[in-house]
Image: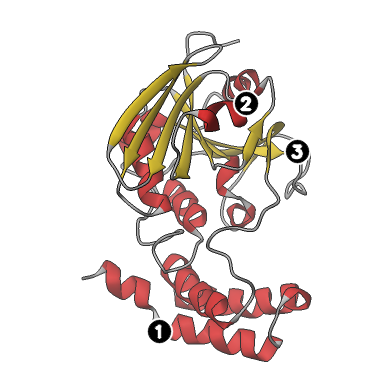
Amino acid sequence: MNKQKKLEVLVSCMHQDNMDIVFKSKLLGDVVVINQCDCEGYDECDTQRGRARMFSTTQRGLTKSRNFAIEKSDADYCILCDDDEVFEADYIEKILGGYEKCPDADVIIFKMANRQPSFPDQVMRLKFPKTMKVSSWQISFRRQALIESGVRFDELLGAGTGNGAEEELKFLCDCQKAGLKIYYVPEIIASVGQESSTWFSGFNEKFFRDRGNTTRYILGLPLSVLYAFYYVIKKRKMFEISPFKALKATLGGIIENKIYKRSKQ
């Protein structure tokens, strides 16, 4: 095992009064916690195999939290974490082992215990459009690869921006554009909570309009229109509104194109 290399879990959370989230998540090694709250502060504590550091900040936005964590980390490898995850006892060995199996990997996508796998049960390279099936809590990366490439999470996207999600897709697309190599390693590292997301309020018209805006921003006009039709047909049974209204709202977001316009201001 690659004992010289350091792994750090990057936790994004809000309004934490103490370091209990580290132990609730069963984090055993090094941890960076970004606690978005109403004050600035710092705390730290020992874990079984490392140190947990909490940075409290009045900043808001999930992608800002992710980028702040990358800035504060000093690890070789990082794995993203939300506040509703519980890690496996051997997650450190599995993640570092993944980078030993794939020594040229810059980003590795891992598996969650209570989520339906999106890929075959084998190590494989991932490129767009397969990266559209990845969730943020599966993503790990070689930190130096991000530092050298300049890739970060796009702060116009994600919870807290009002622009909808898809920040992990934009991140992985930017990684691919920068020439970083993305792999999937089918090792279970954690389970994620079943609670509904704080930003997700259902498959309503706002959801689809936001989705149209985010996909236009990430994929461009032709692909976002094709994806709108695909998504509405594929997921129509889950919607709270008719497929026609869902498609109309999505295409409305694509035409509005507000995120791209904001990025140029």
Q: Which residue is at a point 75% across and 38% down the rendered structure image? A: 113
| Mark 1 residue crowding within 10 angstroms, few (<14) / some (14–19) / many (20+) | some
Quarter placement of the N terminus: top right
Kind of residue indicated by mark 1: Glu
Kind of residue indicated by mark 2: Lys
Q: Which residue is at a point 70% across and 86% down the rendered structure image? A: 243
Nearer to us: label 1 or label 2: 2
Mark 3 vs 2, N-terminal side: 2
The quarter holding residue 228 reads: bottom right
Secondary structure found at label 1: helix
Kind of residue indicated by mark 3: Ala
Horizontal and vertical percent position of residue 6: 47, 17
Between the residue at mark 1 and the residue at mark 3, the CA separation in whole angstroms equals 38 Å
Q: Which residue is mark 1?
A: 256
Horizontal and vertical percent position of residue 55: 34, 33
Secondary structure found at label 3: loop
Secondary structure found at label 2: loop
Q: Which residue is mark 3?
A: 113
Q: Which residue is at a point 31% across and 34% down the rendered structure image? A: 71
Quarter placement of the C terminus: bottom left
Q: Which residue is mark 2?
A: 26
Mark 1 vs 2, N-terminal side: 2
Between the residue at mark 1 and the residue at mark 2, the CA separation in whole angstroms equals 43 Å
